[in-house]
Image (cartoon, helix red, strand yellow):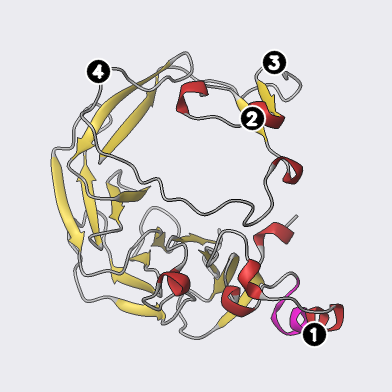
């Protein structure tokens, strides 16, 4: 796996919403990397998608090949160069207030720290910050601001935190469990579903938002409920909440950053958010 670092040579504005010359819609919105290009937008509606289970599920796993000489196509004014390599399943990256890059390597269950100045094209230091984690993904420093005291890490089934001081390259203590259990902590594929959990703190640091992916791609295994049952479920769990194997999934949950079991649901079904 490779981690690419993109540097902007000059500021770029986003695409003009009124300019539809690069908007792909309908069947033209589908394609692969060969039809991709900077600033191209794709509009895919529900009517463009096949119905659930219209075709058999198929696995199409990636193959690792030698890195080609070509570089990714980027907008004018940008360039891409290789920053770090030999990472295993790097899934998320956050920047510490001091500029260190924290990388979640989900499959081996570890967090790596890369240190480099803005003028350096390669890390001058690469250290393992923590190991023994459960498919880690989201990372966030707490409290918000220039001098955090903790780094929070979202495992598949929990949220933990390590004491942190600016410049730490290795965890300075054992992890403290903040959220003991998130949906999908089981070992089977159906229970685990999508493993990525992300973390964001409110600006005042009083709330911690944790996203939890769905257990499936279409939610057809949830089962059907009549209008009255859905209304009762919404009253107990929040508007738009999923049930069955999707309970507390496809959701954004909010917690007290310093309390265990102080949980309530901000919004469970992201499709209902407006």
Q: Nearer the viewer, mark 1 or mark 2?
A: 2
Q: Position of residue 2 (x, y in %)?
A: 26, 37
**Residue at image mark 2:** 29
As measured in the structure, the alpha-carbon distance from the residue carrying label 2 to the one carrying label 4 is 28 Å
- Label located before the other in sequence (1 or 4): 4
Contact flag, marks 1 and 2 (Cβ < 8 Å): no
**Residue at image mark 1:** 232
Question: What residue is at 30 percent from the left and 58 percent from the top?
Answer: 106
State the residue lying farthest toward the right: 228
**Residue at image mark 4:** 69
Q: Nearer the viewer, mark 2 or mark 4?
A: 2
SS assignment for the magenta stretch, majority: helix
Contact flag, marks 1 and 4 (Cβ < 8 Å): no
As measured in the structure, the alpha-carbon distance from the residue carrying label 2 to the one carrying label 3 is 13 Å
- Label located before the other in sequence (2 or 4): 2
Q: Nearer the viewer, mark 2 or mark 3?
A: 2
């Amino acid at each position: 796996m490779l981690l690419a670092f993109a540097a902007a040579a000059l500021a770029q504005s986003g695409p003009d919403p009124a300019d539809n010359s690069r908007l792909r819609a309908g069947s033209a919105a589908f394609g692969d990397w060969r039809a991709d290009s900077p600033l191209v937008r794709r509009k895919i509606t529900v009517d463009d998608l096949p119905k659930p289970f219209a075709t058999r599920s198929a696995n199409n796993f990636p193959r690792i090949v030698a890195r080609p000489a070509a570089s990714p196509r980027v907008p004018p004014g940008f360039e891409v160069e290789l920053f770090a390599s030999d990472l295993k399943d790097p899934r998320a990256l956050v920047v510490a207030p001091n500029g260190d890059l924290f990388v979640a390597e989900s499959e081996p269950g570890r967090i790596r720290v890369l240190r480099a100045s803005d003028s350096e094209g390669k890390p001058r230091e690469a250290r393992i910050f923590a190991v023994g984690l459960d498919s880690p993904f989201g990372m966030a420093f707490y409290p918000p601001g220039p001098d955090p005291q903790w780094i929070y890490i979202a495992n598949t089934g929990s949220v933990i935190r390590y004491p942190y001081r600016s410049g730490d390259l290795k965890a300075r203590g054992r992890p403290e469990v903040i959220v003991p259990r998130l949906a999908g902590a089981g070992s089977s594929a159906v229970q685990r579903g999508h493993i990525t959990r992300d973390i964001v703190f409110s600006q005042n640091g009083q709330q911690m938002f944790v996203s939890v992916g769905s257990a499936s791609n279409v939610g057809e295994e949830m089962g059907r409920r009549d209008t009255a049952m859905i209304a009762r479920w919404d009253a107990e769990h929040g508007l738009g909440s999923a049930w069955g194997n999707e309970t507390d999934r496809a959701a954004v949950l909010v917690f007290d950053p310093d309390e265990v079991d102080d949980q309530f649901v901000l919004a469970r079904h992201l499709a209902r958010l407006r």
